[in-house]
Each structure stands twice: as C-alpha cells, then as structure tokens.
Image: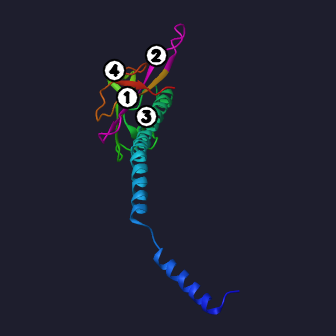
Amino acid sequence: MLKPELQVKFLQHLNRKKRTEEGFTLIELLVVVIIIGVLAAIALPSLLGQVNKAKQSEAKNYVGASNRAQQAYYLEYQLFASSLPALQVGIKNQTDNYSYAINGGGYSSGTIPNPYAQIKAVARKNALKSYYGVAGTTVGDVATSEALTVAVACESLSPTTAVANSTNYLTCDNNYTTLAR
C-alpha cells in the first residue's frame, strides 16, 4: 500500500498525463482524410454507373411491357395500337428520364391495318441509352395462313437522345443490340 502523499502525487501525475494526451494528432487526422478520399474516388464512378443502369431499367421494362401489350392488342383487335393509352398498360408519354411514343399501329391507309407498331423510349438525358421495341406479324403455317405476332426489343450501343423509326420486328437496326438473352 502506498503512502497517502504518494497516492495523491501519483493520481495528479495520471490526471496531468491524461489531459495532455487527449485528441488526435494532425498526422492521424490527415491519414484518415486521405483514406476516405481514396475510397470515395474508387466507389463514386461505380455508384454513378449503377444510378444510370437503374434509370435505364425503366425504359427496358416499359418497352417489354409495350411489346407484350401490342401482341395482346393484336390478338383482340387484329391490328396494333397506335397510342399508349390504347394499350392500357399505364405508361406515361414522358417521365423524368424518357419520352415514350408509338410509331405505326392502327391503319396505314383506309381499312388496311399496319403490319407493325414501334414503341420508342427516347432518353431525355445525355448519359442514358435509348430503347425501342417493334411488334409485327408474320405468317406462321403457310397452309393455314395463320398470323403470328413477333416482337423485338433493342438497346442503343451508346448513350443517345434519338431513336429512328424502324419497321424491322425480327432484328435490331445498326447501332442497337437486342435485349433478348
């Protein structure tokens, strides 16, 4: 057991030592800031890429849903829809990221139905890819002349804010790739 005077001096020494050693040194703080900066520089580009992929999934889903809706519409009415409201799938003409429109469908002249309908998903932001889908008919069995509906969904190879009109419902045009797996 220590004498009371030594105990007091020892406690004072520990108390003084504790006060002077509180906090972090400047070098420790700089190291932490540099590590956080390096991690942010690595993670940020990956994060931004994921944000664009999420925005593009909206267009992929809408194009696929529109193609399927066009095929169902054709089975019921023997022609393709010429407007988004006619499909009744709840797709708006415009969202924050894309503008949607149908090219074709309806009647081409008089009572002759258009043999195809194209849904366009045109990017409204330069960093996003554009999409389109085309639904059309082809003759299945030659003997019965039954009409089959076929569709293709296409993605631009690089970001673009334009989609050309397309009547090809079997393959994608140049500068586009199919979304089929």
Are circles 3 and 1 on residues that touch, CB within 8 Å? no
Q: How far across and down, in percent of the image, does residue 21 sit?
A: 48, 74
Q: Is residue 106 above or below residue 37?
A: above
Structural crowding at the residue carrying mark 4, measured as other residues with C-alpha within 10 Å and reported as few (<14), some (14–19) or many (≥20)? few
Residue 24 vs residue 170, the one in the foreground? 24
Residue that numbered label 2 is attached to: 138
* Secondary structure of residue under mark 4: loop
* Secondary structure of residue under mark 1: strand
Q: How far across and down, in percent of the image, does residue 36 sit?
A: 42, 54
The kind of residue on which mark 3 rests is Val
Structural crowding at the residue carrying mark 3, measured as other residues with C-alpha within 10 Å and reported as few (<14), some (14–19) or many (≥20)? many
Residue that numbered label 1 is attached to: 118
* Secondary structure of residue under mark 2: strand
Residue at the bottom extreme of this rendering? 4
Residue that numbered label 4 is attached to: 174
Q: How far across and down, in percent of the image, does residue 123 sit?
A: 33, 38
Q: What stretch is highlighted in magenta?
A: 121-148
* Secondary structure of residue under mark 3: helix
Q: Is residue 26 inside the magenta stretch?
A: no
Residue that numbered label 3 is attached to: 63
Q: Is residue 61 above or below residue 181?
A: below
Q: Residue visible at 43% across and 53% down?
A: 35
